[in-house]
Image: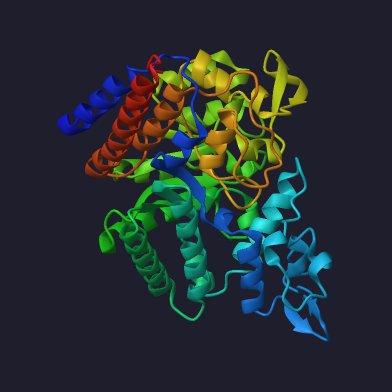
Amino acid sequence: MVDKKFFFIIQQLSLLTSELSDDTPCTDQFIKGLPKADIHVHLPGTISPETAWELGVRNGLIKWKNNQWVSPAFSNGNPHKSYAEIFRNFESIRYERDPNVSLLKYAIITRDFASFDRIMATVQGHRHPPGGIQNENDLWLVLQNYLKQCIQDNIIYTEVQQNIRIAYVIYPSLKPLEARLRLYDLFSRASQLFLSQGITLRFLNCFNKTGSSNLQQSTQQRSEEAASWLDEAASFFPNLFVGLQSAGAESCPEAAPTKLTSGYHHAYENGFGCEAHAGEGTGFLYLNQTIQALPIQRIAHGFQAIEHVPTIHAIQEKNITLVMAPAINLVLGASLHQYSGLEKISKTMINNLDEHPFFALFRDHKLSVTLSSDNPQMGGTSVQNTMLLLSGFSADEDSHLTHVTSSPLTFKEIIQLNVEAIVSSFVDVDTKIMLLNSIHEYLSTYLKIKKDYNLLEGKAFL
């Protein structure tokens, strides 16, 4: 049953936007002031190169010695020879005692997912410990810095994804249950800190569905464990973790959606939201298998749905929302496949934002779509910059991406995408109503000011 208050605020927003013509261009001023929701954020992806440097220095992975910064060799199976290798321009600051670390860049190779994955794993430190995050204080630093990013970009709601297993990295001396409880408590305190700044923070438990997790467990066992930990977290800290997520390369045999079913069904039946990464790597078939096998409300990325119209129809029929991040897709080598029947015969790269299937899936096929940052500081960009780029404006930072030129997002579309982020979020309905009211208040005020200005200037309203 639809909550009456929820239905009412949706109606009110619809009435407000009806005052706008469909082709009204958006403004960068409106985007920057808009209270935003970002519902797909990987916590390690919020770690900037500057923060990664601080973590490295804190934990002795980077040291000042003999008038230069040195980085001891790893001996833990890490694919990097040393922590410093995560930075593209480490050598340029190596001999400066007080370097300007804001100039640091990650050594992510364009269109090379493996380079991105290696860096994320090294900074997070969960796959080949020790890494950048080694203790509670390190993780708290990451959360504090993400709060600053949210304040800067006017984020009022965010869903952050983190594997609960990181508890074993930051609390190595504790028993497993005690370590997890300490992590839940840390995240609860972070949620309270965010709330003190007017931001609602919730978490998804994101488990690795591939063999790169180096665990002596089957994929099915990992999915079941991840779902059971959601129950555990809810019993001690209700409404802190709101959903289940799985991540990892689609090409890995262990990542087959049918191997994730028991965990996802457990989470779904216990009232948790369910999202899965799919349709960003191997093509539409993996995406189709995912939406058929799992009880999901959201797909992360999913742009390869454009390869197969029946898959698009299945997404529509199941009322699944695509949570899209076009910016990082381009950085990591987004591609589309051409087929003869179900056989791949060729592949083409997506070269710019104008070519991204986001526009066709959103506009032409009318799918439920929203935007996210994904990994805002690690190869990607913020959801605000994503909105700016897709609306035809330059990003507010030194972005390597060129903004859309052919058919930028309109005023109505930006509002629609942002509202959809809240509607498809996994938070409780009362919080959704509160968040939608914030957008309604901002939009009402903005349109009134605009209308008054246009009347003063003798112009037609929008």
Nearer to me, 337 or 434: 434
Q: Tell me the quarter of the picture where residue 93 sits.
A: bottom right
Q: Residue furthest toward the bottom? A: 66
Q: Residue at x 24, y 25 (%)?
A: 12
Q: Position of residue 198 (x, y in %)?
A: 32, 54
Nearer to me, 301 or 8: 8
The answer to whether 158 appears left or right of 391 in the picture is left
Q: Residue at x 69, y 57 (%)?
A: 119
Q: How many marks?
A: 0
Nearer to me, 217 or 243: 243
Q: Position of residue 461 (x, y in %)?
A: 37, 17
Q: Position of residue 450 (x, y in %)?
A: 37, 27
The answer to whether 320 appears left or right of 396 in the picture is left
Q: Is residue 130 visible?
A: no
- The correct choice, above or below, for 382 with respect to 201 in the image is above
- The correct choice, above or below, for 140 with respect to 328 in the image is below
Q: Is residue 168 visible?
A: yes
Instruction: Give the image's coloring scheme.
Output: rainbow
Q: Residue at x 56, y 48 (%)?
A: 209
Q: Tell me the quarter of the picture where residue 151 sits.
A: bottom left
The answer to whether 368 appears left or right of 354 in the picture is left
Q: Position of residue 377 (x, y in %)?
A: 60, 52
Quadrant of the drawing holding the N terminus: top left
Q: Tell me the quarter of the picture where residue 271 sits.
A: top left
Quadrant of the drawing holding the C terminus: top left
Nearer to me, 136 or 26: 26
